[in-house]
Image (tube, helix red, strand yellow):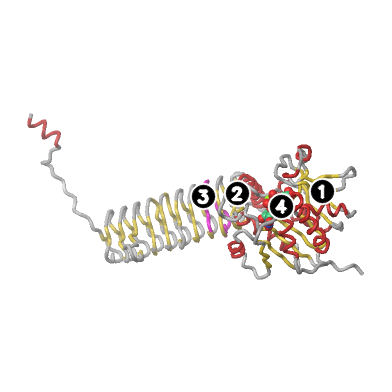
Amino acid sequence: MAAAHPALHIVILAAGQGTRMRSRLPKVLQPLGGQPLLAHVLERARDCHPTQISIVVGHQAEQVQARFPDPDLRFVLQAEQRGTGHAVALALEQQPPDSQVLVLYGDVPLLAPLDIQRCLQSNAPLTLLTADIPDPTGYGRILLGPEGQVLAIVEEREADAATRQIQRINTGILTARAADLLRWLPQAEAKAQQEGHEWYLTDVVALAHAEGLRVEAVLSADANTALGVNHPLQLATQERLLQRQRATACLQQGLQLADPERFDLRGTLTFGQDCRMDVNCLCEGEVVLGHDVSIGPGCVLRNVRIGDHVVIAAYSVLESCEIGNGCHVGPYARLRPGTVLDEQARIGNFVEVKNSHLHNGAKVNHLSYIGDAEIGARSNVGAGTITCNYDGVNKHRTQIGEGAFIGSNTALVAPVSVGAGATIGAGSVITRTAPAHALTLTRAEQITRLDWQSPQLRSKAKS
Ligand code: UD1
Ligand code: MG
């Protein structure tokens, strides 16, 4: 009978301040691809189906904990951040000693799931994930013996010039039995006290080796995925890596991206067939595209649902709205939350729409503000039309019936309604109901004075 797998306890270290980020936000809450660093680590932890996940928090612990309210998580408070060894020791207190422990660092967010699996599949008493990187500055270096066995991890602070040349680094990921870690960690603490540095988790490697136990070093298949985030440049580097991964996944699923290097997804993007996205678009939250959708360059889509055969032209910003089949939006349109466009509606350049519903085929093509409005099917709202929806205290609604024609530069002072098929003369200020199928306009009559002379002509006539 095969031996039963021991329980897997994943410990995520997230108590550090992240001084090198020079930010007031705790490091593990810094956003990567629109989510905190810690969320990425947690996703990888969950993929391993552990019995338990413990997160060690300390610096701004409440803020970190509040961001992850999931009831299955066990938070361990490390009030004073004495080092990674201390953090793991706290997490293992009063925990089953026979469980297998996997330590993940809250600031190593993009680990390849396969690398984690390879570590977990090792049957050595201690296994760590290592990587070869050209610039190993700041990382713990892996010291190998003559037969390639791992002797120790030397932290940058303790490394001499020769050791600093070593390009094989410790990624921070390590797995061992809880009982073994609980035996090694107090010894690592004693060493830290003697040598006057932080309590390093990484010192367990030399201690295991001293006991004659085998330490296995798994080498990451893609070193870039195993890099840590300690300062803004590293955060930006991992952001680009993640975005390249997301762009590749979208391309493989059939999205035609003009340039995978100029695409950012900070959420989820789903799309049908024949969707195209030009350069420098940003998708945030949940973005859904139907079939045959074309997104022009420089667009921002945040929590947007778009139907089939839609064009969103260059530099348009859409947030929390729904775009029906066959619509055309932009260039330079701004659709704010609560905008709903039914089929074939058109929004043109320099038009802002908020909390408004445009029915089938309605058009607002140029330079308008439409707020808190209902625009009937096939209505045409002329250039420069403004819904005056705010009286300084309350918001009011504007209703426009089917097939209405609103002349250019009309101010619709809400609450107000325009009947179906009505025409509003250009330049009107509409404050009362405009009846259906009639012409309504408010306009001073045009006059011409033929006897008028310009001041220049008048002064010439005098001299
Ligand atoms: C650490 C490793 C180093 C490795 C590198 C990989 C140690 C001693 N060094 O260095 O070998 O190459 O990661 O990225 O482990 N933390 C706590 N409590 C503490 C201190 C840290 O929870 O008392 C957490 C931090 O929040 C962070 C993680 O542990 O998420 C790593 O700490 P950090 O200070 O970033 O260590 P590095 O200098 O990156
Ligand atoms: Mg780090």
Which tag is nearer the camera, tag 4 or tag 1? Answer: 4
Question: How many residues crowd around disc 3 within 10 Å: few (fewer than 14), some, or many (20 or more)?
Answer: many
Residue linked to disc 3: 299
Residue linked to disc 2: 21
Q: Is residue 109 visible?
A: no
Which tag is nearer the camera, tag 2 or tag 1? Answer: 1
Q: Is residue 350 left or right of residue 158?
A: left
Could you tell me the amino acid type at mark 1?
A: Ala
Q: Position of residue 155 (x, y in %)?
A: 74, 46
Q: Position of residue 344 (x, y in %)?
A: 47, 58
Q: CA distance from mark 2 to mark 4?
A: 20 Å
- Label 4 beta carbon less than 8 Å to ligand 1: yes
Residue linked to disc 4: 198
- Residue range of the region highlighted in magenta in the rendering: 286-302
Q: Is residue 297 left or right of residue 256?
A: left
User: Of label 1 and label 3, which has the lower sequence position?
Assistant: 1
Which secondary structure, mark 4? loop
Q: Residue at x 89, y 67 (%)?
A: 3
Could you tell me the amino acid type at mark 4?
A: Glu
**Could you tell me if the residues under marks 1 and 3 are in contact, i.e. CB atoms within 8 Å?**
no
Q: Position of residue 239 (x, y in %)?
A: 63, 49
Q: As rendered, which of 261 and 8 lies closer to the eye?
A: 8
Can you name the residue that lies furthest to the right here?
A: 1
Residue linked to disc 1: 152
Q: Is residue 289 magenta?
A: yes
Quarter in which the C terminus is drawn: top left
Q: Is residue 87 left or right of residue 183?
A: left
